[in-house]
Image (cartoon, helix red, strand yellow):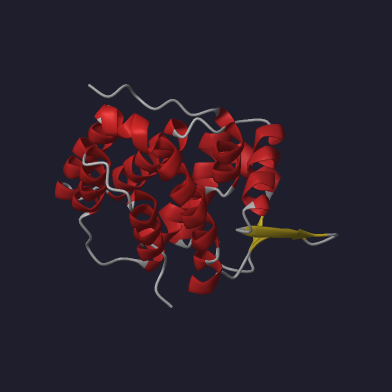
Amino acid sequence: MTPPVVHSLREQIREHILEGIISGRWQPGERIVERHIAVELEVSQTPVREALRELESLRLIESAPNKGVRVRSLTAADLKESYPVRAGLEQVAAELAAGKLAADTTALEREVAALCEADRAPDGEAQVRHTVAFHREIVLASGNSVLLHTWESLGVEVWTTLSIRWLSPEPRSHAQEHQELVDAFRRRDPAIGELLRTHVLSCAPRL
């Protein structure tokens, strides 16, 4: 049984704001008022400010003197920018982790099983969560802390959420795609890095 995912208060607030942006509650150019969110969620303004700062670093919102925080007008091109960078990082991670994951794919198989359930539902939130977890396991297996930190700084979960739920509405078998990667690790495919890079790029929004 998979343990429940526990998020910090800042992460919960970030997800609340992100959901509002995705659903259209806050339109591009519309102001997001820190104090209003704090009152709505019955929290102090400090974690709200932290969540907004994180979303600004990911270029989802923007702030300006005397104008406050506003939702950026995002396009498919904006969402696509991070994918080549992420693809390169994960290619390196796969090559570094190849030996370790060839010997034990348990962590990857766990996420694929969860993706099977999410695909059947279909459950978009679970698809995002387990897709990101699958790729994080590969980066973790690389054993390179600099690589992990850089990968996490890209906001992979946020961009995956937007790509799957906002600009890629067509059904997709996430489990099958990731099972193919597990199989490649198991057979010690020498092209595993390139396979993962191609997979990540294929997930980028279509222009």
Res 38 quadrant in image? top right
Q: Where residue 177 appears, x then y in whole percent?
A: 23, 53
Instruction: Decide if residue 11 is on the left or right side of residue 57.
Output: left
Q: Quadrant where the C terminus lies?
A: bottom left
Q: Tell me how many marks there are.
A: 0
User: Residue 55: image x %, image y %?
Assistant: 62, 50
Q: Nearer the viewer, residue 11 or 139?
A: 139
Instruction: Indicate the position of residue 5 as horizontal and vertical percent values.
Output: 39, 27
Picture quarter with the N terminus:
top left
- Residue positioned most to the left: 120
State whether residue 121 appears in this view.
yes
Q: Image quadrant of residue 108?
A: top left
Residue 169 drawn above or below residue 6: below
Query: Foreground residue, 186 or 204?
Result: 186
Residue displayed at 30% across by 47% down: 127
Could you tell me if residue 75 is visible in this image? no
Along the line of sight, which residue is nearer the eye, 61 or 207? 207
Apparent side of residue 77 relative to residue 34 in the rendered image (left or right): left
Q: Which quadrant holds residue 113?
A: top left
Residue at the (59%, 70%) spot, across then down: 73
In x, y percent, where is residue 75? 52, 73
Is 159 positioned to the left or the right of 59 in the image?
Answer: left
